[in-house]
Amino acid sequence: MKPGHGDVLLAEGDVELAEDERRLVEEFRCQLDQGMWAAVPGSDAGGRHEAAMVRSFEEIPRDAERVIFFPRAAGG
Amino acid sequence: MPVLAAAIVLALACLGAVAFTPDLRRALRRRRARLGRPRPYTFDPGRERRAEVKARRLLRSVVGEDAFAMYSELGFIRVGGGHGGYGYLLYPHRSIIAFDQRSGALLNEYCVGFPDSSDPASGSRLPDSDDVLAKWMALRGDERRLIADANMHLPGRHVDPGQVQRDLLRLRAWEGQRRRAAQ
C-alpha cells in the first residue's frame, strides 16, 4: 500500500519453485528492511475474515495467496 | 580575407566563452541540483482518486462484504477487541475509538498513523481506505503491538464523542436493518 498509488504489485510467484521463492524472499526482506509491516489476510475456520502479521518469510503459510505490506504504525 | 573572418569568429568565441562561462557553469550546477532533489509533493486529485478506487477494492477483498458494506454506508468499520467486551471504530485518518460493546461508553482514543515518506512526490498519506485497512490488519493481526505504538488519549481529544455516539446508534440501526432484511 503506497500513498498516491494504492496497492502496487511487488512480486509474484510460486513458492514451490526455487527461483520464484528466492525472488519472493528477497522482496519480502527488502520491504521489511524499508520498515514496512507485512500482513497475510485470510479467514478462520468459521469463515471470519482475519489477518496475521508476519515478521519472517517462514511465518507465511505456504498456501497464502498474498502478503500485504504497509507502512509501520506511528503514534500520532 | 577568409583567414581574417575566421580569426574574428575565433576571437568572438573566445570573448563569449570568457564572458559567459561562469554563468553557464552556475546554470548547469543549479540544473544538476534540481534533478538530484526529490520532486516536491503536489496534490493531484486524479491520482488520489485512482489510488482510492484501488484501495477500496483491496479493502473489500480483505475485510469481506459485511465490513465493506459497513464502511461504504456508515464511513467506518467496527472491529471486536481481542479480549471481548470492547470494540474499536476505525475511521480513515482519524484516531481509533475504543468503546464498551454493551453500554456503548467510549473508553479511549488511540491516535495512530501509517506515514510513508519513501516517495515525497506522492506524499506520505495512504489513501483513506488503505488507512482503514492498515488499522484493521494491524488490530486483527497484533492488537497489542498496534495499541502499544499508538498514543492513547481520553475520548474527545481528536474525535467528537457526540459524533461517535451517533455513529454507534447508526451502527445499531444499520445492523438491525440488515438482520431483518436477511430473515
Image (tube, coloured by chain):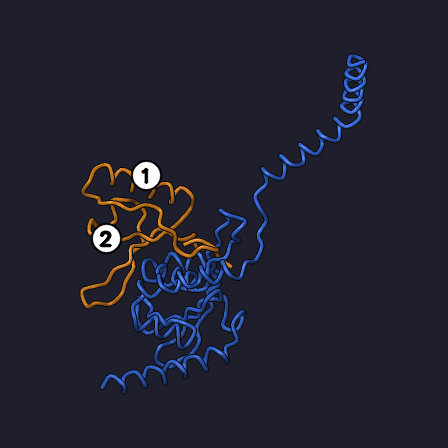
Chain colours: A orange, B blue
Helix, strand or loop under label 2: loop
Helix, strand or loop under label 1: helix
- Residue B59 vs A32, above or below: the answer is below
Q: Position of residue B173 (x, y in %)?
A: 36, 85
**Which residue is drawn at the image coordinates 32% and 47% (left, top)?**
A55
Q: Nearer the viewer, residue B76 or B140?
A: B76
For the residues beneath circles 1 and 2, the answer to whether they share a chain is: yes
Q: CA distance from mark 1 to mark 2?
A: 17 Å
Q: Position of residue B65 (x, y in %)?
A: 30, 71
**Which residue is drawn at the image coordinates 27% and 86% (left, top)?**
B181
**Which residue is drawn at the image coordinates 40% and 53% (left, top)?**
A70
Q: Find disc 1 in the rendering and name its residue.
A: A26
Q: Position of residue B124 (x, y in %)?
A: 51, 54
Q: Residue furthest front?
A: B1
**Which residue is drawn at the image coordinates 50% and 61% (left, top)?**
B46
Q: Quadrant of residue A11?
A: top left
Q: Find disc 2 in the rendering and name its residue.
A: A64
Circle count: 2
As shown in the figure, which amino acid type bears the numbered disc 1? Glu
Does residue A75 appear to the left or right of A28 in the view shown? right
Q: Position of residue B132 (x, y in %)?
A: 41, 64
As shown in the figure, which amino acid type bears the numbered disc 2? Ala
Check residue B109 in the rendering and tell me which mark sits there, or answer none: none
Q: Earlier in the sequence, mark 1 or mark 2?
A: 1
